[in-house]
Image: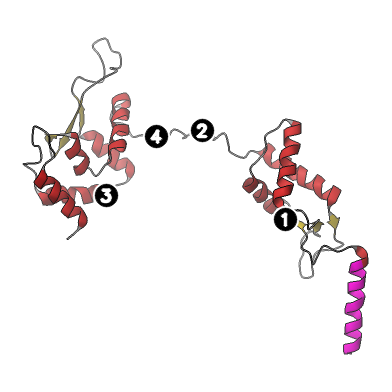
């Protein structure tokens, strides 16, 4: 047996506990299929149907035309008055969601709800100046501590890479970036946003691996060894 069907049957058999005994006249199949139909609706469609079954007994507006601060709300299901508990079961809605919808209904009437951030830009959103500061910081950092390579890797048309000390990590560089922003009195970005900008705008600036982190003398020795191996193979 379906768990939802069993829940509906148990609820109707035990009753809602209100004085009106509003579950007596309801059929199990009727309530069960209505719950399934509600689950197929979008959030906006479900809100409209739920608000369509709400009613303010003393109206939303006072006789003087002012919004009523407290108004009694009645609930209907299948065109019959029901208690709040039965209404929640029939419309497959939780207590907090229903209370939020009732508050909206009292303030705005049966109008669709809008998210509070619609048309607003979040305060934590990354703006152009934030990206510009990160790019300038990394470029200056690479100019100061980086080791430019003479050319891009073979088979690549990209910009020649600039290697940073392998002892550094993106975490330590980000901490230095935060400190520079603090000294300048400007906003700094979190590490994830910092790394995303680095990856998108300055991918040629890299932290050298231990294999890549060699001086010019070591690099010359490595090339001489490779040439000697090639000559011996010939």
Q: Nearer the viewer, mark 1 or mark 2?
A: 1
- Can residue 233 be found in the magenta stretch? yes
Residue, disc 2? 120
Q: How far apart are the alpha carbons under marks 3 and 4?
A: 20 Å
Question: Is residue 114 left or right of 84 when viewed as pictured?
Answer: right
Instruction: Specify the segment rendered in magenta.
Output: 218-234
Tag 1: Cα neighbours inside 10 Å, few (<14), some, or many (≥20)? some
Sequence-wise, which precedes: disc 3 or disc 4?
3
Badge 4: residue crowd in 10 Å (few <14, some 14–19, many ≥20): few
Q: Give the dominant element type of the magenta stretch: helix, strand or loop.
A: helix
Label 2, label 4: how far apart the Cα atoms are:
12 Å
Q: Say the numbered circle drawn on residue 114.
A: 4
Q: What separation in Å lies between label 3 and label 2 (alpha carbons)?
A: 30 Å
Quadrant where the N terminus sits is bottom left
Can you tell which mark lies on residue 39?
Answer: 3
**Mark 3 or 2: the one toward you:** 3
The residue under the point 33% across, 43% down is 43
- Quarter containing the C terminus: bottom right
Give me the C-alpha separation between circle 1 and circle 3: 47 Å
In the picture of the structure, the residue carrying the numbered disc 1 is 203
Residue 102, picture quadrant:
top left
How many residues crowd mark 2 within 10 Å: few (<14), some (14–19), many (20+)?
few
Quadrant location of residue 52? top left
């Amino acid at each position: 047996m379906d768990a939802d069907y069993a829940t509906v049957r148990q609820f109707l058999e035990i009753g809602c506990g209100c004085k009106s005994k509003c579950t007596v006249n309801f059929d199990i199949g009727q309530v069960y299929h209505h719950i399934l139909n509600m689950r197929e609706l979008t959030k906006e469609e479900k809100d409209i149907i739920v608000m369509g079954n709400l009613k303010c007994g003393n109206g939303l507006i006072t006789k003087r035309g002012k919004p009523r601060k407290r108004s009694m709300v009645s609930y209907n299901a299948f065109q019959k008055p029901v208690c709040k508990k039965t209404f929640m079961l029939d419309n497959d809605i939780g207590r907090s969601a229903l209370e939020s919808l009732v508050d909206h209904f009292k303030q705005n009437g049966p109008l669709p709800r809008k998210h509070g951030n619609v048309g607003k830009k979040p305060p934590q959103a990354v703006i152009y100046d934030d990206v510009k500061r990160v790019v300038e910081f990394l470029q200056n950092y690479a100019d100061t501590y980086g080791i430019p390579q003479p050319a891009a890797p073979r088979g690549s048309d990209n910009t020649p890479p600039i290697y940073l000390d392998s002892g550094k990590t993106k975490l330590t560089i980000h901490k230095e970036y935060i400190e520079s922003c603090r000294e300048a009195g400007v906003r700094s970005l979190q590490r994830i946003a910092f790394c995303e900008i680095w990856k998108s705008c300055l991918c040629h600036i890299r932290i050298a691996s231990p294999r890549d982190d060699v001086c010019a003398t070591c690099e010359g020795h490595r090339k001489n060894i490779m040439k000697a191996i090639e000559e011996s193979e010939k």
